Amino acid sequence: MCGIVGAVAERNVQGILLEGLRRLEYRGYDSAGMAVLSADARLNRQRTMGKVAALDARLKEGPLNGSVGIAHTRWATHGRPSEGNAHPHQSGDSLAVVHNGIIENFESLKAELEGQGYVFTSETDTEVVAHLLAREFTRHRDLLMAVQRVLAMLDGAYALGVVHKDEPGVVIGARKGSPLVVGVGIEEAFLASDPLALLQVTDRFIYLKEGDVVRLSQKGTVEIFDHRGAMAERPVQVFEHGDGAASKGEYRHFMLKEIHEQPQVIAATLEGRLSERGVLVKSFGANAEVLFSRAKQVHIVACGTSYHAGMVARYWLERYAGLPTQVEVASEYRYRQVVVPEGTLFVTLSQSGETADTLAALRFAQHSGYLGSLAICNVPGSSLVRESDLTLMTQAGPEIGVASTKAFTTQLTALLLFTLALGKQRGMEEARQTAIITALRGLPTLLSQVLALDGQIETLSAAFAEKHHALFLGRGAHFPIALEGALKLKEISYIHAEAYPAGELKHGPLALVDSEMPVISVAPNDELLDKLKSNLQEVRARGGELFVFADEQVAINAEEGVHILRLPHVDEALTPILYTLPLQLLSYHVAVLKGTDVDQPRNLAKSVTVE
Ligand code: G6P
C-alpha cells in the first residue's frame, strides 16, 4: 500500500528519499515519485510507473537536488496506475503533496475547485488536496495554517506530506486514519508512513497521534500540533528491532528468510511471558488480571492471515478455557449490528496494527459495551496498540514479504499464551497446562526440524507448477491452517486454491476432484485422524493426487498418487503452528518455479490502510 517519505536535512535528500522508498517497496505499489525543493526555492519532481528502480533510473537522467523533499510509492485506489496519477501531486509549480489513504468527499471538493478555475491533471482524490492547499496558502501565506484549514474540509483517512516553494525549509505532515511517524535525526528531521523507511538515517521516532499535524523545519526542528491546533508533546521512542530485517541476508527472498526465522521469533514471543507456574498474565498489561477474570466470552476480529489465526484461537479458547468465542473478518464486523453479551472481551489481531478495517472495528467496539479490548500485534507504537486497553506484542520483527508467515505463527503463539492465561483462571487442569508449556518451550527445536525438510518440499512443489487449481483440506483447528495454506498459494503463485473442512468435501468440492486437482492435507495424529483418512480415500477414489503432511506416528503410506511427508510429533495443542510451516514452504517453492514476484505479489499490499 502507499508509502510516504519526507525529509528536511542538512544535505541533499534525494538519496535518503530514494532509499526510504526502497525500504517501503515491500508494502506493494505500482508507481513512485519524488519532489524536492532546490536551493533557489524551485520545486522539481520526477515520477515513474513501476518499481522504485525505474524512478532511480529517471533520477540518474534528471537528478533532484535540494535539502527538503517528499516522496511516495502509490498503490492505486482512485485512478489507474499511471505516471500522471503517481504522487507527488502539484498545484501549479509552487506546492507538492503526497498522500496515503482516501479522501471520501473528493468529488464535491473537486467540483468546487473546478468552479474556481483549478485545472485537474490526474484522476486521483489526492489532487484536490494539492489545489485546496495552494488556495489556502494564497489566502493565509502560512503553510501550517493552510494545512490545518484544509484538514477541516476533508472526510476520510489520510497521512500527508506537503512542501511549498515559498516556505523552502519546511515539510508539513498530518495524519488521520493512516500511520505517520517523525524520524528524529541530528539537526535533521524526517517523515515516513513506516519507521522501516528511515532506519538508514535514524532509530529515534515520534509516533504521531490521530489528528496531529507536524512541522519539520531546519536544524531538526519538530513542532507538533494536536487535532485542536494546540502545541503537543509526543515522546521520542527508540526503534527496537535492528536494521537487519531490511536485508535478505543469505536468502533469495524475504519470504524465505522470514519462514526460516520462525524458530527464533517464536522463542522471542515466549520470552519473559512464562514462569514455572504458567503464563504471566501481566504480560498483557497491568489491568489484564482483572479483565481476564471478568471475561465470559471473546470476540476476535481481524483481516487476512490474522483472521485465520483468530479462527485457530476459537478452537483453543473453547477447548482449553471453556470460553465461548466468535471470530469475524473486520470488514464485515464493522458494518454489522453486533449483539455484545455482557462480559465480552474484544480482541484484534494484526501484524501491522494499521489495517483500516481492523482499526475501525476496534473504534466501533469501544462504544459497543465490551468489557475491554486486547490487541495482539507486531508493531510497537501502531494505532491498534495505542488505542487498545491491553496489548500483547508478537516478537516477529519487521515482516517484509507481503505474504505473512512469521507474523502468523507468532500470532498463534501469542494466542496460545492468551488461551492458557484465561484457562488458568477457569480451572484448566494444571497437568495439561504444564504439558502445553513444556511443549511450547520445545517448539522452536521442532520447527527447525520441519524447516530441514525444505529440500523434500521443494521436490513436491514441482507437481504444482503447471496446475491451475488446488484444494486444501483440514479438520478441527487445522481447517484454518488449510485456509491459510490456500491463501499463501494463491497470494504468491496465483494458482486458484480453496480450503475446506475435510468433512464438507462430499457436499460440493468433491465434484471438482480429478487428476488435475492436487489435494493437500495436514494429518496430525489427533482424534479426527480416522475421519480425515476416510475423506482422503474419497479423494483417491476420484483420481485426485494427494499431498499429505502427516505426523511421523500416523499409519498412512505413500503409494501411486499419494505423497506423504512426515513431520515430527508434537503436543496436539501446537500442531496448528507446526503444520503451517510446510504449507508456507510449498507455496514459496511453487511461486519460485512459476517465476512470480514472491515478496511483492501483484495487486497486493502489505499493510492495507484504506478500506
Ligand atoms: C494484507 C496483507 C496480509 C495480512 C492482512 C491483514 O492483506 O497482505 O498478509 O494478513 O493485510 O494485515 P494485518 O497487518 O492487520 O495483520
Image (spheres, grey):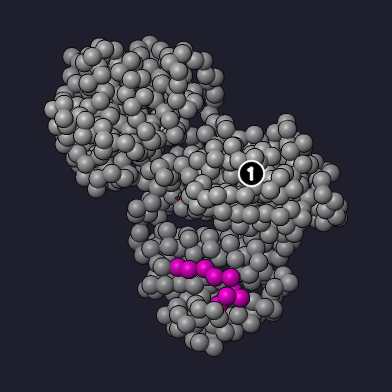
| Residue to which mark 1 is pinned | 346
Q: Residue 145, located in which quarter of the rendered image?
A: top left
Residue name at image x 31 percent, y 41 percent = 74
Pick whichever, 24 or 321, lies toward us.
321
Quarter of the image with the C terminus is top left
Q: Position of residue 405 (x, y in %)?
A: 53, 52
Q: Which residues are magenta?
A: 497-505
| In the image: residue 79, left or right of residue 608 | left
Q: Is residue 501 magenta?
A: yes
| In the image: residue 215, left or right of residue 405 | left
Mark 1 is on which residue type?
Phe
Residue name at image x 42 percent, y 58 percent = 491
Q: Position of residue 64 (x, y in %)?
A: 21, 26
Quarter of the image with the N terminus is top left
Q: Position of residue 495 (x, y in %)?
A: 40, 67
* Numbered disc 1: secondary structure: strand
